[in-house]
Amino acid sequence: MKKFVSNNAEESRKFAYDFAEKILTEKREKNCALVLALYGDLGSGKTTFAQNIAESLGIKEKIKSPTFIIFRKSKIGNKKWQDVGFENFYHFDVYRINNEKEILNLGWEEISSNSRNIVLVEWADKIEKNLPKNCVKIMFKHLKGDKREITIS
């Protein structure tokens, strides 16, 4: 478990970029997407982290939380990520999911089992049973002002 305290938005942005670089070089499972499961209260930094990760992946369109449509798919534009086999970025916001089975109707199993995908899930606690065992769990805690505590397990 690793903890990081960010004092401002720029430190949070740098953390997301550094985190992305680190996971880029780690060994991946063949039959599984890279799943980033985000936990934390409203306003704790999950969407900002998602935006920063997307930016590091070379995604050009503006990333906003897909609360009402549940997920958005984007093509990864950064050649570094493409060269290691990643093609798509899925940004899920499952806040409005009432039952873990609802996520399955959206193609979750196919999306999360494709090793060419990076899947980021906000409010991951709502679909805990459907997350792959090897997902990266990231907890966000709002301290005060712009300060955030980020814990990776």
Image: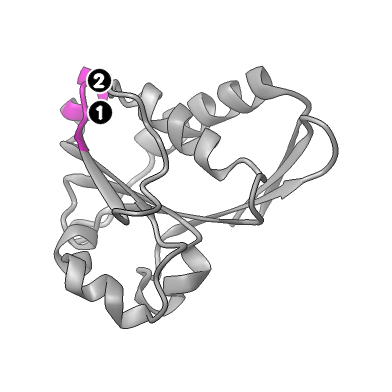
Q: Quadrant of residue 30?
A: bottom left
Instruction: Let me know if residue 77 appears in the view.
Output: yes
Q: Say which element carries label 2.
A: loop
- What residue is shown with label 1? 81
| Residue 25 in sight from this viewpoint | no
Q: Is residue 54 left or right of residue 75?
A: right
Dot 1: what SS? helix
Tag 2 residue: 78
Q: Nearer the viewer, residue 40 or 19?
A: 40
The N terminus: image quadrant: bottom right
| For the residues bearing labels 1 and 2, Cβ distance under 8 angstroms | yes
Q: Residue at x 14, y 64 (%)?
A: 110
Q: Measuring from the top left, give residue 51's x and y in whole percent.
A: 44, 31
Residue 80 image offset from top left, x and y in percent? 25, 21
Quadrant containing the C terminus in the rendered view? bottom right
Q: Tell me if residue 94 is in the magenta stretch.
A: no
- Image point (29%, 53%), residue name: 69
Q: Which residues are magenta?
A: 74-82
The three-letter amino acid code for the residue at tag 2 is Asn
